Image: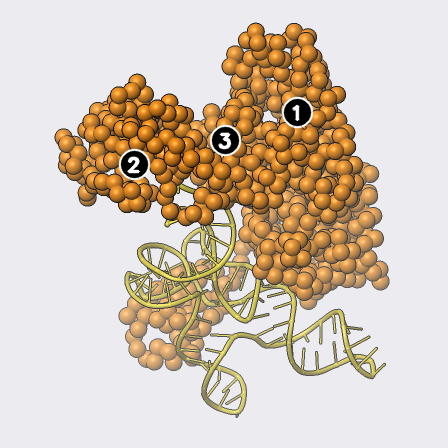
Chain colours: A orange, B yellow
Amino acid sequence: MKKYNFNKIEQYWQRVWKESGTYEPNLKKAKKPFYNLMMFPYPSAEGLHVGNMYAFTGADIYGRKKRMEGYDVFEPIGLDGFGIHSENYALKIGAHPMDQAKISEKRFYKQLEAIGNGFAWDERVETYDPNYYKWTQWVFTEMWRRGLAYRKKQFVNWCPSCKTVLADEQVIAGKCERCSSIVVKKDMEQWFFRITKYAEKLLGNLEKIDWSEKVKIAQRNWIGRSEGAELKFSILNSQFSIKVFTTRPDTLFGATYMVLAPEHPLISNFKFQISNYDDVEKYIKNAAHKSEMERIEEGREKTGVELKGIKAVNPANNEKIPVFVADYVLSSYGTGAIMAVPAHDERDFAFAKKFNLPIIEVISGGRLINSGKFNGMDSEKAGWEITKLAGGERKIQYRLRDWLISRQRYWGAPIPMIYCGVCASKNEGEQKEMPGWYAVPEKDLPVKLPYVKDFRPQGKGESPLASVKKFYETKCPHCGGKARRETDVSDTFLDSAWYYLRYPSVKEKNKAWNPEITKKWFPVNLYTGGAEHSVLHLLYVRFVAMTLHEAGKLHFEEPFPKFRAHGLLIKEGAKMSKSKGNVINPDEYIKNFGADSLRMYLMFLAPFEQGGDFRDEAVLGIVRFLDRVWNLCVKEIKKSNKASEETLRLTHRTIKKITNDIESLHYNTAISALMIFLNEFEKKGVDKENKEVFLKLLAPFAPHITEELWSELGKKTSIHKSSWPIANSKFLKEEDFDLVIQVNGKLRATIKMPRGASQRDAEKAAFGNENVNNSIAGQKPKKTIFVPNRLINFVI
RNA sequence: GCCUGGGUGGCGGAAUUUGGUUUACGCGUAGCACUCAAAAUGCUAUGGCCUUCACUGGCCGUGUGGGUUCGAGUCCCACCUCAGGCACCA
């Protein structure tokens, strides 16, 4: 008997698949295109993580079933190899990122091949390939041309360890997303993308797309829409006024002081009116040095300084109220200033108590008090009335901030912009607001990243490219004079914000994507990935698609109508991390048990969208299962006994269950159904036809062993191109059912009965049962509940 | 503090579609078979307590406490707890 040599089988079929293009759809002519996309990995660590494999396997199973259902499935893969994560890894091991990329690339692709996914190997994308980032730069210039990219000086997040600025989305609880260092604020001029312009659309479209609910919620919270009013408080004896945003204009009469954020530009205008300006300045300086983390660590303890010598006027009642500067007000939200209502806001209350400010209640039981002519009015109604009185206007405010795109690092796509001082002095430029700035013309793209020996981040607020004269010296595209290139590189998240568009057009030389191919394959049918990207990648990618759609370059607005987040794989109750030393490398498991075993085990341990706990011994259950599959098929390969009615019913029930389970990503229960199926075959024997059905149902989960056994059956074409079985409803109907007999809701007996049995039949059967009779003990039932084909319950 | 998802055997998890047999499937454990022996494999048992020589039968059991119902893991209310996310956003 032939032995199950999984290593040999897996390597053999992986080669055959690749050489014969089994998983290469015809991108131009496909009739039923199905784009099965998964988030591409970043090759930063020592190798592919078992968590990556978990994600890829789950996505692949779905794609394999779709392929067997007759779709032209396109399942591409690539590497998100540009960016800080890869650069930091290179730094750590003392390699140059450009050299390291080639090494990592080889290793990752080898591992990705070993897991046995149906990848379309001919269409790979590596974000650090100049043929790719040429178009990343082109996307940047498109943003620029449409007025969506701009430079601005403001306080930004700075990671002192990564020595670069970060987007808000990359600051997690005050720490750097990559290295967990505490992020500080720095006043710098940087490139931004105007994502806030799309806040409403990004929010509204969430209603139209089929995504994991938790990801939608995270995006909603991140965008953070608030409805309210913008009100003006004039400053006594000056032409200035303070604008505030509030969601509670109904409490205006209770506004007893105002607070400006430390960065508020108005403060410096009152240098001579403010009697304690030294103290104020000191406070502001101090606040600027504080990190987000320090502010959080101080807890709710409020600090601040009064701007002595100036007063604001409450527009509702003309009361003169004091003005403070305090860091509990953020410069980056709303107008950077607030009206403080200590009676109805916890934070204002804490501040007022500390500084002994009056606290006036203006709402009681949902109605206004102490509010002049508004007294007694419903608070909800009063809001708009008071706004009108105060000369304010309705305003919708978002928490979302513009996307900070520049990075002071080496390993990224250079921002394709040129600055000409001469043009600037003449007030010339491509954008009115930004004289001197020009995009690199498309014919000059890509702006190639040079091989720089000392690529380490400088920490001076500049990229290492700023010390490479050959790089930054260039000609002005407008006047032809001496000009300087932008030396910052773009955020890695720009690379991954459009990669899915490139895959099917990867052979296109003169365009970022081919319009006909794009029309055929987009939007993506299913996108799978981690929920950790809820407000990073998944927000940026929608934003970029939206702008390209608006520019008429894409026929869709939402790139991923269906997205599913897979769960997190943990190890014995703890997150896998290098510091804990519990990271699982899939290579060893593949070598010892085979890729099919590991794939199935990963999918069996919990629902795919929930994630699960990896436990070493549990893999054995699947190893045994595949051994038994092999033995059964090899042993009985020539035997062909006719299947019983009962076997057929099980077969069709299983077809239906597995078809539904794969559709809903409940792979764990699908595998359990396969196990039940196998147990039955071992007991009863299996005919050729049912064996084929079984192998087909198993094929998406264990692609290699099923391919081998399929060819053993004498098949000449791949099982993965065979047709998915369809359940015949004729065999789904059961003839008998187990009647549940209860007395007072408690189970007393179960009796097999023909389907459609009447209540009379059921009662008769029940009273013929000794145990039921004992429970009833001769009493007459007060009530009898009969549920056809299920149960009968006697209430006594 | 706010939002989201959980809590079922020794363990991972089934069962919520439509309230109707709790613990499918697998791991682990125990016993048996095979073996000189072990591993592997196969078979049997496996929620707790009680009852019976045995066959059997009973009671309890899905985080806690209430409620609705003939009947609740499933629906309602309150709470406890774990995991994840956001966090001075006015």
User: In x, y percent, where is residue A517?
Assistant: 67, 25
Task: Judge whether residue A690 can be spotted in this image.
Answer: no
Q: Which residue is mark 2?
A: A340
Q: For the point 54% across and 28% down, which residue is it? A: A188
Where disc 3 sits, the SS reads strand
Quadrant in which the N terminus of chain A appears = bottom right
Q: For the point 81% across and 54% down, which residue is it? A: A7
Q: Which residue is mark 1?
A: A487
Q: CA distance from mark 2 to mark 1?
A: 44 Å
Work out whether mark 1 precedes mark 3 in sequence or the reverse, and give the earlier one. 3
In this picture, residue A743 sits left or right of residue A463? left
Give the answer, above or below, for where A500 lies relative to A674: above
Camera-side residue of A753 and A403: A403
Where disc 1 sits, the SS reads loop
Q: Amino acid at mark 2?
A: Ala
Where disc 2 sits, the SS reads strand
Task: Judge whether residue A14 can be spotted in this image.
Answer: yes
Camera-side residue of A110 and A579: A579
Q: Amino acid at mark 3?
A: Phe
Which numbered tag is attached to residue A61? none
Q: Which residue is mark 3?
A: A155
